[in-house]
Image (cartoon, rainbow, N blue to C red):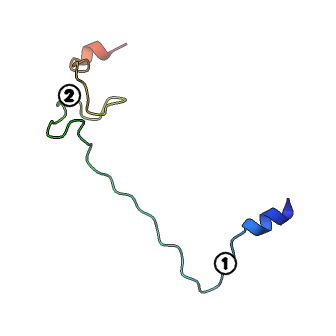
Amino acid sequence: TGSSVSRLARRVRPGSNPTPARSFKVEAKGEWLPGLSSPSYLNGSLPGDNGFDPLGLAEDPESLKW
C-alpha cells in the first residue's frame, strides 16, 4: 500500500556524497586441477568450455558438428 512505499523510499539529502561507482575485474580462466593447464583446443570459444575435458571429446572439431 501507500504507507509501505513511503517507508521504503530513500531520503536524498542535498550535498550528500554520491555512491561510489562499482567495478569488476576479469581474471584468467581457473584451472580444474592445480598445476595442470587446460588443453590447447579448449580456448573458451565453445559453449560450456570450462577447461576440463578428461575424455578428449572436444579435441576433434568435426565431431562437435551437429
Question: Rounded to the nearest whole Å, what is the CA distance between mark 1 and mark 2?
Answer: 53 Å
Residue 45, image quadrant: top left
- Residue at the spot of label 1: 12
**Is residue 32 left or right of 7 when viewed as pictured?**
left
Name the residue nearer the viewer: 17 or 5: 5
Image position, residue 19 (x, y; %):
52, 73
Identify the residue at horizontal 26%, vertical 29% (top origin). Answer: 52
The residue mark sitting in front, 1 or 2, is 1
Are the residues at dot 1 and dot 2 in contact (C-beta closer than 8 Å)? Answer: no
Asked where in the image residue 62 lies, by quadrant, the reply is top left
Image disc number at residue 47: none
Q: Which quarter of the rendered picture does the C terminus lie within?
A: top left
Could you say where residue 10 lies in the image, as x and y percent from the top left? 68, 71
The residue shown at (33%, 15%) is 65
Crowding near pointer 2: few (<14 within 10 Å), some, many (20+)? Answer: some
- Considering depth in this image, is 4 or 50 the residue closer to the camera? 4
Marks 1 and 2, the one that precedes in the sequence: 1
Q: Residue tagged by mark 2?
A: 41
Which residue is at a point 39% across and 58% down the rendered structure image? Answer: 24
Q: Position of residue 60 (x, y in %)?
A: 22, 17
Figure check: 8 above or below 45: below
Which amino acid, mark 2?
Tyr
- Hey, what amino acid is under mark 1? Val
For the residue labelled by badge 2, is the local secondary structure a helix, a strand or a loop? loop
Quadrant in the picture for the N terminus: bottom right
Q: Is residue 66 left or right of residue 51?
A: right
Residue 3 in percent (x, y) is at: 84, 65
Question: Is 38 placed above or below 30 here?
Answer: above
- Specify whether 15 is left or right of 23: right
Q: Dividing the picture into quarters, in which one does residue 36 lie?
A: top left
Q: Residues within 10 Å of mark 1 (few under 14, many from 20)?
A: few
